Image (spheres, rainbow, N blue to C red):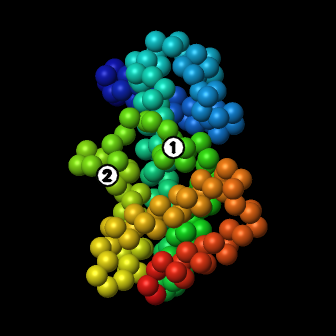
Amino acid sequence: MSVKERKERERADRERLIVATARELAEQQGWDAVTTRRLAERIEYSQPVLYSHFRGKREIIGAVALEGAAEMAVALRAATSAADGPRARVAALARAYLDFAERNPAVYDALFQLDGGLAYAREDTPEQLKDAFAALLECLAEVAGDGVHPGLFTEVFWAALHGLVTLTRAGRLLPGDAGSRVELLVDRLAVI
């Protein structure tokens, strides 16, 4: 291995460490606790080293969001591939989405609540974000209904899921009714 290859590998390892540490700190204490000073202390590198990888917290949030989008896409596809029939797939998709948000609140915030400097719904949208949307679309396109654009239906269904996540996390919905909400969403929005 050449010196250049070793340095590139070490740089990639440091970048993964920064993102993993930011994510861990955000999940434990919230995004307000994620500062370059704290990250530098935790990973035992100087702040200038962090800045050589990311220009600031915004870019770190974006990196966590991209990682989270890739994980979400995998989780959604795994859930839907194990389900039999359109209704079961849509219900599995909804449950997997809500479960992902519950298990990864800081990642969910990085994806959908915080400014990570990422472009959404544009030509320059990062592939990880496009793939996460595609994981929704793959399942929902088959239940959009006649004359309904599958992408538009996916956006509306996704917005309903996001609303459930947001309202549940804010304590605005009764916690015991999550399953009933999924069933109602699947039965009323999807054409099955």
Q: Could you tell whether 63 is left or right of 161 in the image? A: left
The amino acid pointed to by label 2 is Ala
Residue 9, position in %: x, y?
40, 29
Which comes before the other along the chain, label 2 or label 1?
1
Q: Is residue 140 above or below residue 114?
A: below
* Residue underneath mark 2: 121
* Residue underneath mark 1: 113
The amino acid pointed to by label 1 is Gln
Q: Residue at x 53, y 58 (%)?
A: 162
User: CA–CA distance between discs 2 and 1?
Assistant: 15 Å
Contact (CB < 8 A) between labels 2 and 1?
A: no
Q: Is residue 26 above or below residue 77?
A: above
Does residue 91 show up?
no
Task: Decide: few, some or many residues near mark 1? Use Cα within 10 Å; few <14, some 14-19, many ≥20.
Answer: few
- Quadrant in the rendering for residue 147: bottom left
Disc 2 is placed on an element classified as: loop
